[in-house]
Image (spheres, rainbow, N blue to C red):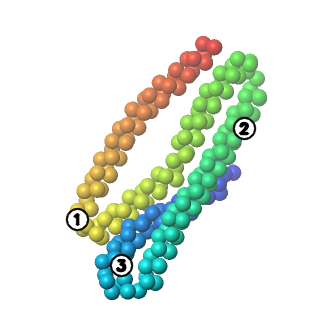
Amino acid sequence: MLDALKWPILAPIIPRLLLIGFTFCQPLLLQRALDYLQDPAQRQHANAGYGLIGAYFLTYFGMAASSAVYWLFTYRSLTMIRGMLVAAIYQKMTTIGLTTVDNAKAMTLMGTDAERVIRGIMDFHELWASVVQVGLSTWFLARQLGVAAVGPIIVCLLSFVATMGAGILTTKYQLAWIGAIQERISKS
């Protein structure tokens, strides 16, 4: 599956990088706009103001466009993956020769597993992008605040630990949910 769909899976990377870039343009533009408004000498030049307006337009248009393309490519690849999984399940079900009742039970369980796989893959690009964003944010904060940038890093690490703890609890409840589905299907 990864070999057949490597390009659709990799396609969201460039729009996601562009979205990160446009996102980080916002505070830089805000700082530039504040500098422009605070300096009366700069306000004498209308072209600088028009340039800021154009930069804001390009930044927000770029954010909207790159976000739309990113999610388009992401959902397109997820749809392709789901299609391959469902086709593989269907092909397997038609070749193993189960009874109709067993077939329905197995299809339900495999459909649940396929949805869990898709849900896990959905946030794949968000995972690496978050690491890039945290790194860039930390670097920008360190440039502006110096040593005080350590505080947000500590908060980030604590949030990561809390998320991992919640993930362990979530896994426990997801396993119980899948067990309940299996039990419900076995009774039908």
| Sooner in the amino-acid sequence: mark 1 or mark 2 | 2
In x, y percent, where is residue 169?
Answer: 39, 32
Residue 52 in sight: yes
Q: Which mark is residue 87?
A: 2
Q: Which residue is mark 3?
A: 36
How busy is the neighbourhood of tag 2: few (under 14 within 10 Å), some, or many (20 plus)? few
Q: Which residue is mark 1?
A: 147
Say which quadrant the C terminus sits in.
top right
SS under mark 1 = helix
Residue at 34%, 67% (x, y): give it.
140
Q: Residue furthest top?
A: 187
Check the image and report above or below for 162 versus 31.
Answer: above
Instruction: Identify the amino acid type marked 1.
Output: Val
Inter-mark Cα distance, 1 to 2: 54 Å
Is 145 positioned to the left or the right of 107 in the image? left
Q: Nearer the viewer, mark 1 or mark 2?
A: 1
In x, y percent, where is residue 142?
Answer: 29, 67
Is 120 positioned to the left or the right of 156 in the image? right
Inter-mark Cα distance, 2 to 3: 59 Å
SS under mark 3 = helix
Is label 2 in contact with label 3 (beta carbons under 8 Å)? no
Inter-mark Cα distance, 3 to 1: 28 Å
The one nearer the camera, 98 or 64, is 64
Instruction: Identify the amino acid type marked 2.
Output: Ala
